[in-house]
Image: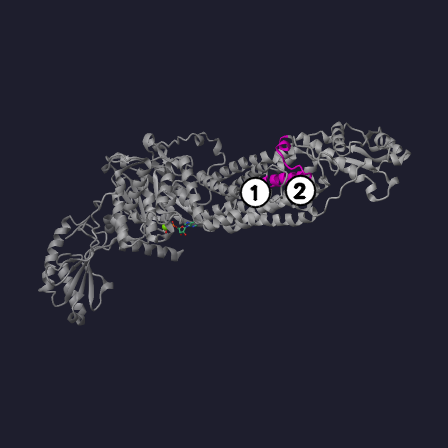
Amino acid sequence: MPASDAAVLRIHPHPSDFTLVSQMTTADHDKTPLDTLSQDSFRVSARVSLRRQLAALVRKELTMKLRERTSTIVSIVTPIFILFILFMLNISLTKGITDVSPKPLATLSSNCPAGTAKTSCVSLGFTNSTNIDAVLAALVDVVAAAEPEARIVPFPSVDALQAARNADPTRFVAGVQFRDLSNLTAATTTPSIAYTIFANTTIIKTFQDVRADTADAYVRTAILNVFRAKQNLAPLRSPLVSAPAFPSNGMLFESVRGRSSSGISAIVPFYMIFMLQPLLQGVMTGLADDKLTKAKSGLIMMGTNETMYMLAAATANMLFAIATSLLVVLIVCVGGIIKYSSWVLVLVLVVEYAISLVLMGCLLSIMFSNPRQVRAMSLILMFVFLGVYGLGLALVWKQNNLAAERAMQLLSPVALARALALIMDAENSALGLTTAAWTTDPRFAAPFYMIAVDCVIYWCLAWYFDKLFPGENMGTPQPWYFPFRADFWTSAAKGLDPSTIKKNLPRGSSRFIEPFDVNGIPAADRDVLTICGVTKDFKSAEVQAGGLASKIAQRFKPQKLKRAVDDVSIDLHSNQILALLGHNGAGKTTLISMITGIVQPTRGNIYMRGTGNGSNTVLDAADPITLPVWRQSLGVCPQFDVLFGPLTVRETLRLFMGIKGATVEGRVGGAQPSSRSSLDNDYIDAVASDVELHSKLDAHVKTLSGGMKRKLSVAIALLGSPRIILLDEPTTGMDVAAQQRIWSLMRSCKKNRVVILTTHSMEEAEVLGDRIAIVSAGSLKTLGSSIFLKDQFGTGYSIGFVKKQAAAARTDSADAAILGFVRRFFADAHIDPASVSPTEVRISLLHRQSDATLGRGTSGGGAISFGSFYGALQSAVSTGELSANVESVNLELTTLEEVFMRFRDDEALLQESS
Ligand SMILES: Nc1ncnc2c1ncn2[C@@H]1O[C@H](COP(=O)(O)OP(=O)(O)O)[C@@H](O)[C@H]1O
Ligand SMILES: [Mg+2]
């Protein structure tokens, strides 16, 4: 008889009719691999490099964004659409003003009585209380350029000036009293300036005769030229038509004022904040979506550094945000919304702001992680920022208090709005934000460096809080003081001394656990992974993607705990596959997640033996400091594929090689190929052909079938030859052929590795598991080889007899005859009462647990009694005493299924009672 316990032996009346119904040879755990792995012909090492992870992740983000062209273009140009409205507004508001045809101003000297003009007439009298030499010099220049014969006369006081005018109105054209020019020399661009023009109304004939306009134009031009000189700008030309150096200027100065519409300049700061808000929203929704689809937790489970993940998302978003900024500045500057300012400075400002928004998005995504919530929140936050800006407008800016101003600019939108307000102000004076103004005026410079400071602050906070609140099932939170832990910064993570850890493994003490003799395997293979009394309670209200906000909300809700894993202890050794068998919801995935460190056990520990120099220490999965080293040893195939639709299979494998830091060092024994990249390509080819995805290497992942995706996930788990391989239901959705292929792959890859496989298929557990652990309702029911489980929990062996038509009428006597026959060989045999029917009867040979005769396997004494029993049974059925009653005989052996079902029934009872 073949050593097959799951097989059903069917004995027909004719000799030589023993047919093996099931072909599975499962008791044979010394399976030889069906084939060797192609990837085994490469020498591969894995060493996680953050820079490589970042590069791989950024490349992935960019590739995905470029492949999803439409949505990317929409997100880049959304702000541009909004800007377009501003642009149209600007055009329509500016049009009416430029249409005003400039009126020439009359000269001052032409209003003096003929003949007296050159010598005794006062064209422009002035008086001042503070030192205004610079303005006077500019004034003389401007007036002299337009009308060389005009006389500018100083007066000691306003009274003297008015007295002079009253004394002889015909010889006094206009006067100006400079009242407050005190801060003119301070390094500000728009100081308060007050002066009074005295027009001579005594000689009025037409309005133009009062030369107030002309005088005012001269004074203003002079003041502006003082500022322009400070910024090394050419002086404005004279406002009068007749200026000989600048023929036919018209009212140049007047028209300059008109062109920057004050209406639009007031809304520009607000407008730009709202216009760029989609950048913030884009980052936040992107990160939130990744949490919801479990892409983030998957990536982290597979060894991605949390910070690199966030940095990669930020970098990719920044590149696109910079593209948006370029377009915005192009339109704003070319479209004439900003005319006089240096476009380079405006670009720097907008780009800086775009970057700060992306980083702010990273920070906020830690708090808000529901995509729908994010959309509303990013808008609400912008309103809040504008409110703060409004406060500044009402209270802070006018105090001229730079410290207060800077404090408010810790919010980068406030800083941008403030900068734009200053720019539009300066634009209104035809000055704009120039390099000179930027270097001289601290108010201009402040937003530039404050936004840079904001970027740094936002990133540091995002980095810090991400470590503190990684999100439920996203990793192990660090203690708040982690930056002060010395070992956080020294990358050499130290393991624990094995003697300090508490191990209370049930080493075969219970009859449910098969004793495993570790002395039978090499010391190097022992206890590679140890799960010690691990328990996990989930709060039932918990959302997987819940962020900080929902976490806080839950604080105030009563909690009901759900125990997903209950005090599980298993020790795992190399060269073995452990099959975790359990129905849906048994807690398999939770256990795997705890091994990867993304879910923290409520109680208990998981230890891993260190590698290399640290092989005499152990690592603890709960220690966030050593977790990167821990993850380096793992290859994970999560239950849900962590794959990205727009990438091809090749790109996906390359991405995960980057994440795991897998480096192909060469071929085993083979010739060295010419280049590294061809070596990498060959390795990827080999990995793909191991899982039969070779023909799909350049297909997009979204075009793969479910089974193919699982294969790809398995291939990813094997990348870089990890020491411990965790496969969570790897073969779900695969066809039979693919399943067999993956099974043989797993058997080939268990060499020198710990393999944990979860499944709810008995067949899979039986074929692959060197040891099988049955979990039910979170607790470990039993652990041992398939034979052990059947021995312990099986219903023994039974023989089913199919009765002949004729025997159906006399059931009892037929059954008695059959039982009598069997009892000659097995004294304990009895009729299974549930099986009695007119056509069939089943006879159990043994009670469970009375495994004395049929012990482990069939190699013991039991086999001999079976042998003679078969012979007798055969002849009795075909020609002998049973031939009248029995049509055919089925010998049935306990299957793992029966064992499994028993535990499932146990749990059904448990759930009913609770
Ligand atoms: N994040 C979670 N929050 C609350 N309950 C959870 C969470 N994850 C899993 N569970 C619960 O824990 C139990 C075990 O789940 P799981 O480990 O996924 O089972 P399996 O992988 O064996 O099918 C289930 O009852 C499930 O509802
Ligand atoms: Mg699961």
Residue beneath label 1, please?
A: 330
Check if residue 425 falls in the magenta segment.
yes
- Which residues fall within the magenta stretch? 411-439
Residue shown at 32%/35% (left/top)? 676
- As helix, strand or loop, the secondary structure at mark 1 comes to helix
Q: Is residue 292 left or right of residue 575?
A: right
Find the distance from the CA under tag 2 to the CA under tag 1.
31 Å
Q: Amino acid at mark 1?
A: Leu
Q: Secondary structure at mark 2?
A: helix
Q: Which residue is mark 2?
A: 391
Q: Mark 2 or 1, which is nearer the eye? A: 1
Question: Predominant secondary structure in magenta?
Answer: helix
Q: Nearer the viewer, residue 755 or 357?
A: 357
Numbered label attached to residue 345: none
Q: Position of residue 343 (x, y in %)?
A: 59, 38
The image position of residue 689, as x and y in percent, is 28, 46
> Residue 576's x, y, as percent?
27, 42
